[in-house]
């Protein structure tokens, strides 16, 4: 085996290493974070939950998938529960 191979291998890993520095933790690749959930509460002015942004003021840190919200989480606008929410695009 030629002696240059190990060095070439290390160079090949460099881009992946640099990429890892800029890519956020594994959760960033979760497809559920791209979903938009809209409140279907009858009196709701149209609240939408965006998992990437979350709703930090209402107990949902940014990056929290809708499915991972507590079961007793409710719409901060109208108080409707999670079952009243609908995923956009379905
Ligand atoms: Zn609502």
Image: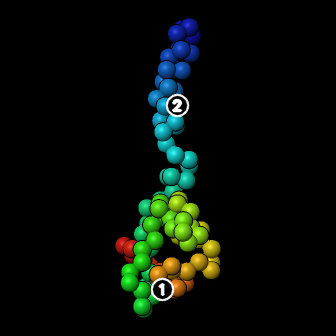
Quick check: 4 above or below 64?
A: above
Kindly identify which residue carries mark 2: 17
Task: Name the side, left or right, on which 90 lies relative to 58.
Answer: left
**Looking at the picture, how far across and down is residue 77, in whole percent?**
47, 81
Q: Colour mode?
A: rainbow
Kindly identify which residue carries mark 1: 78
Give residue 58's quadrant in the image: bottom right
Q: Disc 1 vs disc 2: which is toward the camera?
A: 1
User: Quick check: is the Cβ at mark 1 less than 8 Å away from ligand 1?
Assistant: yes
Quick check: 14 above or below 54?
A: above
Q: Look at the numbered disc 1 and give the secondary structure of its residue.
A: loop
Q: Are marks 1 and 2 in contact (CB under 8 Å)?
A: no
Q: Look at the numbered disc 2 and give the secondary structure of its residue.
A: helix
**Looking at the picture, how far across and down is residue 40, in whole percent?**
43, 85
**Looking at the picture, how far across and down is residue 86, in whole percent?**
44, 79
Q: How dense is the environment of label 1, judged by Cα within 10 Å: few (below 14), some, or many (20 and up)? A: some
């Amino acid at each position: 085996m030629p002696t240059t191979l190990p060095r070439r291998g290390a160079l090949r890993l460099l881009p992946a290493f640099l990429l890892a520095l800029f890519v956020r933790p594994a959760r960033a690749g979760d497809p559920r974070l791209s979903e938009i959930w809209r409140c279907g509460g009858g009196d709701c002015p149209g609240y939408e939950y965006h998992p990437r942004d979350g709703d930090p003021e209402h107990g949902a840190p940014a990056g929290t998938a809708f499915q991972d919200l507590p079961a007793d989480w409710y719409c901060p606008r109208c108080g409707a529960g999670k079952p009243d929410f609908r995923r956009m695009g379905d």
